[in-house]
Image: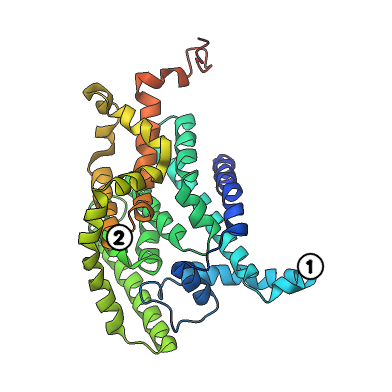
Amino acid sequence: MRWPRWLLVYLLALGLVAGPAYPMYLHYDFTHSRDTLSYLSLARGEFGGVNVTRRYRVLVPAAAAAVAWPLEKVYARIWPQRATSEWPLRLGFYVVNCLLLAGVGLVLFRTCLLYGASPAAAALAVAAVLTSRWTVYTAGLPLVDSLYLLVVALAFYGARSGSAAAVGAVLLLGFPAKESALLLVPWLLWYGRHALRWPWQLAGLAVGGAATLALRHWIDVQAGATAIESVSNALGHFENLTYSLRRLFSVKGIGELFSIFGFFSLLILAGLRTSAARRNWLPALGGAGGWLVVIVGAHMLLSGDLGRMGYLAAPVFAVAFSLILTRDPLFGWLRPDASGRTAIPTS
């Protein structure tokens, strides 16, 4: 039975996410953030006045509202002054986002193993991803990035494992999670074709697309908006390209990229130090890893938010991180010796 070990990994990931994110949930003043205010409005079923970019990302807010409903009853008994405030909804977002990001951790762990990493290296890679500053923001605040990160992680996992269920989940959840999931479609059609053949992928796209259009129409009716607004908004993202490129090649932009995974990024630099070191892991990523990074780059340029969108490269980063730890001689002391014990240096 494998489920106990996967449950253990999931709980490890949940612990890595929930603890650091709790102070963010409890203390962060997000009233200046349009994103968080928009998603709180969506969770309350208030669509009017929400920016069209965020108006249709309702899955996580709906789940947070479902979690918040019983919490309001508890708050009414314990903290009556909080029951009618935003605290139940904020806690609902915290719970949902932590659970989703723990799922991301489990998917990343399994993906690393499929690429040939050792379990210890895979666990360290998950820790490197889930201790990112963006994990803390995503879990602790009323945001919806957790679901789309799970979609990207499932896409990378599905392409490697041949899991039709993972690819199918991406096709169904991608568009409701984030409109830019459209960028993933060509990648998935090619690299996911062994998991789910094109006729079935196209059928999944049709079902997911139809459900998304129906949902968007219903939301437009509630908000008193027209469909043309969302089309104009989508095209307007191309105006961010100049700003994003200028920022990318600035000192501040480079710092923002480094801050995605922080000092864990230095391990990737160590893995790039020589051609022999690169051969240990870079070819293993293949076209799937390389092109997924390109797609994440497109997300970054179109959104203008380099760090937050760059975090979507977490699946590729985790695999690269784990393979370097597993194969690079520089980290040979982490690998068990013939007796099965890890050769920890004493001097």
Task: Please provide percent x and percent y for residue 108.
Answer: 43, 44
Residue at image x 26%, y 65%? Answer: 202
Q: Is residue 123 visible?
A: yes
Where does residue 91 sit, x and y in percent of width and height? 62, 63
Judging by the rendered image, the residue that carries numbered circle 1 is 78
View extreme (front): residue: 251
Structural distance between the alpha carbons of marks 1 and 2 = 43 Å
Left or right side of 12 for 115: left
- The single residue placed furthest to the right in the displayed view is 77
Pointer 2 local density, CA inside 10 Å: few below 14, some 14–19, many at least 20 = many
Q: Residue at x 59, y 41 (%)?
A: 8
In this orientation, which residue lies closer to the viewer: 232 or 161?
232
Of the residues under marks 1 and 2, which one precedes in the sequence? Answer: 1
Q: Amino acid at mark 2?
A: Gly
| Mark 1 surroundings within 10 Å by alpha-carbon count, few (fewer than 14), some (14 through 19), many (20 or more) | few
User: Nearest the camera: 14 or 162?
Assistant: 14
The answer to whether one can see residue 100 in this image is no
Vertical order, 145 against 49 (above or below): above
Residue at the disc numbered 2 = 304
> Residue 328, labelled with which disc?
none
Is residue 297 shown left or right of residue 76? left
> Colour scheme in the image?
rainbow
Q: Indicate left or right for 12 with 169 as reference.
A: right
The quadrant of the image that shows the N terminus is top right
Residue 93 in percent (x, y) is at: 56, 64
Closer-to-camera residue (84/179): 84
Q: Secondary structure at mark 2?
A: loop
Q: Amino acid at mark 1?
A: Ile
Contact between labelled residues 2 and 1, with CB atoms less than 8 Å apart: no
